[in-house]
Image: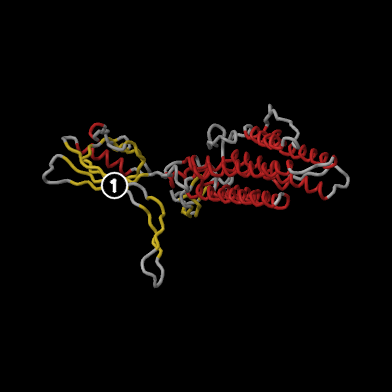
């Protein structure tokens, strides 16, 4: 099928125009690192640059002056606009430069040369560094953490012969751990959870499945939904405050450092203490995986609808990494050599993946700069002067911690995003 069969009517900001020639170009940002007394250079791929559309627009006829003036007015408006490309369809672009040309051989018309620059972040869906792939990897890593801990618990229960005192202590330890994880249900207002209630000493994997079901049901009581749902940003009453609040509920209720199980005997033996430590380490790994999943849900939503400030993302990431480190310490001190090594490795990988996902989300934002306020007045007026819309006033207030301050003076230095 030829392009002439699907050609669209070209327009910019709703202003139609005729096209004599159109082309689209792209480039790649390449950083060259050169070293003294070394031939050549080391090239670093910095990603694809924005696409550029070069247009040769034509205006002719008795009323071409009015059409030309309307088109130039559309080009001179600040910010981005919608361009209907005759071949590639709708694009969000900014008019970077233009030049109108009148020729002696073209008496009743004019030609306008325009360069549009596309405004979009192109995230390659299957690229290693795409945010969606990173967050999916974290979810997979959380499952690996749980599976490793579950395998270690099953090996311990299946390969050990217990006497009655150890059975009593272990049964109580399992009950305490399950009760600890279940606390989050009352905080999130979740109910209607049915557990297997099988003996953990006979069915350790059923006990582990109950822990996961408890966390999954608790997540459904939060504003960002279940573990497999994506946080959608500020829709309805959902705001950045609720995103952080949801994460903090999960973190404070499931913090591994607070999972302290106490043997139900006056003077527990070293063997009993070791048994309880294994159950405790297993619960801590489950809790760390759940907290990492909560952080991932918020980060996945940030990639689509940014609602958090950079400091919030950094704090969320640091807290989750600390949680993973405490779970690693518990696994190393309680589990057998094979299990502790595996659990430590998957938890460390999970923490690193979370850090890289947070870095990718932060890099999606424009650079933070210091700018002078162009006008004096309330924050909404300053936001309109800076960005062409008053809707970004809350962003300026958060970046500069203005609180209840009413007015800003002209020339005052403010933190703001570059665009």
Task: Tell which residue pokes out farthest to the top in this image.
Answer: 192
| Residue 196 locus on image (x, y percent) | 71, 30
Is residue 100 or residue 299 the one in the foreground? Answer: 299
Coloring scheme used: secondary structure
Q: Is residue 361 left or right of residue 345?
A: left
Would you place residue 61 above or below residue 415 in this image? above
Residue 286 visible here:
no
Task: Tell which residue pokes out farthest to the right in this image.
Answer: 266
Kindly indicate the quadrant of the structure image that contains residue 166.
Answer: top right
Q: Is residue 281 left or right of residue 305?
A: right
| Residue 120 locus on image (x, y percent) | 40, 44
| Residue 112 locus on image (x, y percent) | 23, 44
Task: Tell which residue pokes out farthest to the left in this image.
Answer: 105
Is residue 129 or residue 339 the one in the foreground? Answer: 339
Is residue 35 or residue 240 the one in the foreground? Answer: 35
Q: Is residue 177 left or right of residue 70?
A: right
Kindly indicate the quadrant of the structure image that contains residue 193.
Answer: top right
Residue 128 visible here:
yes
Query: Helix, strand or loop at disc 1?
Result: strand
Q: Is residue 290 left or right of residue 236?
A: right
Q: Dot 1 corresponds to which residue?
A: 115
| Residue 339 locus on image (x, y percent) | 67, 49
Rendered residue at 59%/50% (across/down): 351
């Amino acid at each position: 099928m030829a392009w002439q069969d699907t050609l669209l009517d070209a327009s910019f900001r709703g202003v139609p125009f005729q096209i004599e020639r159109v082309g689209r170009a792209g480039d790649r940002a390449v950083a060259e690192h050169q070293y003294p007394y070394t031939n050549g250079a080391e090239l670093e791929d910095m990603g694809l640059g924005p696409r550029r559309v070069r247009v040769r627009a034509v205006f002719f006829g008795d009323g071409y002056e009015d059409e030309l003036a309307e088109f130039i007015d559309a080009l001179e408006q600040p910010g981005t606009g919608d361009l209907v490309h005759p071949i590639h369809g709708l694009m969000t672009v900014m008019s970077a430069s233009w030049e109108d040309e009148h020729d002696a051989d073209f008496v009743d018309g004019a030609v306008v040369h325009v360069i549009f620059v596309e405004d979009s972040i192109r995230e390659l869906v299957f690229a290693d560094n795409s945010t969606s792939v990173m967050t999916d990897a974290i979810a997979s890593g959380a499952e690996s953490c749980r599976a490793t801990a579950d395998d270690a618990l099953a090996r311990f229960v299946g390969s050990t012969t217990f006497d009655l005192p150890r059975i009593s202590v272990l049964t109580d330890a399992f009950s305490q751990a399950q009760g600890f994880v279940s606390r989050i249900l009352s905080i999130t207002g979740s109910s209607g959870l049915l557990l297997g209630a099988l003996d953990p000493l006979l069915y350790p994997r059923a006990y582990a499945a109950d822990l996961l079901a408890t966390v999954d049901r608790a997540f459904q009581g939060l504003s960002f939904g279940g573990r497999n749902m994506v946080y959608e940003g500020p829709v309805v009453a959902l705001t950045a405050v609720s995103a952080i609040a949801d994460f903090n509920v999960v973190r404070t209720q499931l913090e591994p450092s607070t999972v302290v199980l106490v043997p139900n005997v006056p003077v527990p033996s070293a063997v009993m203490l070791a048994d309880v430590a294994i159950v405790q380490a297993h619960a801590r790994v489950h809790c760390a995986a759940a907290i990492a999943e909560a952080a991932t849900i918020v980060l996945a939503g940030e990639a689509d609808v940014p609602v958090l400030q950079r400091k919030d993302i950094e704090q969320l990431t640091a807290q989750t990494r600390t949680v993973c480190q405490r779970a690693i310490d518990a696994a190393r001190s309680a589990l057998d050599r094979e299990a502790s090594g595996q659990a430590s490795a998957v938890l460390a990988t999970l923490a690193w993946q979370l850090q890289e996902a947070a870095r990718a989300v932060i890099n999606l934002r424009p650079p933070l700069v210091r700018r002078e306020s162009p006008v004096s007045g309330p924050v909404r007026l300053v936001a309109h002067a800076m960005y062409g819309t008053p809707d970004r006033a809350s962003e300026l207030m958060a970046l500069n911690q203005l609180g209840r301050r009413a007015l800003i003076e002209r020339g005052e230095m403010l933190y703001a995003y570059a665009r």
